[in-house]
Each structure stands twice: as C-alpha cells, then as structure tokens.
Image (cartoon, rainbow, N blue to C red):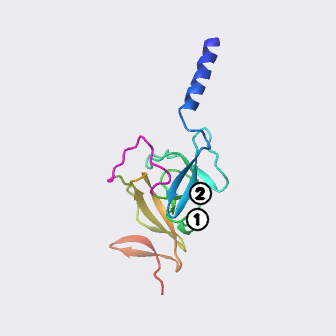
Amino acid sequence: MKTCIAALVLAMFTSTCNKPPTGASDMSSVGDGAVALRRCDRTDPSCPEGEVCALSEGGFNDHEPTCLQRCQTTRDCPSGMRCAVLYSEFIDPVCVSDSVPARRSDAPYDPQWHCDFPPSYCKDASTEARPFSEPLNRTCGHELIFCVNGCQTVDEGGIRVGRCNPSG
C-alpha cells in the first residue's frame, strides 16, 4: 500500500513539473500589439470569461491548448486576428492568427500543410464563412467575415458559394 501511494505521489509530482502550469500566460505579438494567452488542458479547461479552451483534439488542427477570445465575426478580434470556426474543435468561434494559438512543439513546420474543406458559404444574411488553412500554427477552419451589404450565394463555375455583396 505504501509503495502504491509513493508511486502515485511521484507520478503526480513528475507530471506537474513537466508541463507549464495551468493558467500560465504567454505574450504573443499579433498585429499592432501583444495578446495575453492562457494555457488550458483537458484536466483544467477553465478559461477567463469571454474565452474558450481550444484543445486541438479534432485531428485537423495541431496547436497548443490555449484559451482564446470568443467572437462573432473578424471585426470582434484584435488587429491582425481573424474570427474562426476551427475544424473539429467543437467550440464557439474564436480569434486566431498565424501565431495564436502557437503550433505544438512536436509538430514540424510544413509550408504545404493544409486542410481540405468546402467553399465559402453564407453563415447568415450578413456573415460570409470563408475557408482558411494556416501552416505556421496548423490551424484551419472558416473565417467569419461581417458583410456590410449582406452575404449572397452565387454560382462560381457550377459551385454554389457564399460571398459578401459588393458595395454600391
């Protein structure tokens, strides 16, 4: 019994020492400023209010688990970031960039990395959902773009796609 307890305590201590503490913040440069990031994980997915834990468990994205700001469209995000529905993450739309969240340290950079996805579509009457792949941090999904003049479905070479209406 004493051996089991000692092994359990040792395992808990070792796993805690080998990962960054939950709630630790990093500063990543995005656009004109820095964005404070908080790490999260499966055992403690809690994030500050207005953020959600992006765990990168869906098989498409390959980034560090991070608390990310919720958004409705890109205009809700800090400069240099996009509002995105990340593939297979099963979370609300979040603000991302080419460096937020960070690529996992064990995922090598590959400029050819990409996701295959359906074309743009109108999420609603004023939002275009435009596909993207970002090889720098291995995130992909649909960016949510606010359409000042509304979103319409058009035919492009026999494929129905969503596009923001041009101004005028």
Most foreground residue, 68 or 18: 18
- Tell me the residue that label 2 is attached to: 69
CA separation, marks 1 and 2? Answer: 10 Å
Q: The N terminus is located in which quarter?
A: top right
Quick one: SS at disc 2?
strand
What amino acid is labelled 1 in the image? Gln
Residue 72 image label:
1
Q: Give the main secondary structure of the magenta stretch.
A: loop
| Residue 159 percent location from the top left of the image | 36, 70
Q: Which residues fall within the magenta stretch?
A: 98-112
| Residue 65 percent location from the top left of the image | 53, 45
Instruction: Answer above or below: position of 125 versus 17.
Output: below
Quick one: SS at disc 1?
loop
Residue 105 in the magenta stretch? The answer is yes
Within 10 Å of disc 2 (Cα), the crowding (few <14, some 14-19, many 20+) is: many
Task: Tell me which corner region of the image, top left, top right, bottom left or bottom right, holds residue 119.
Answer: bottom left
Task: Tell me which corner region of the image, top left, top right, bottom left or bottom right, holds residue 95.
Answer: bottom right
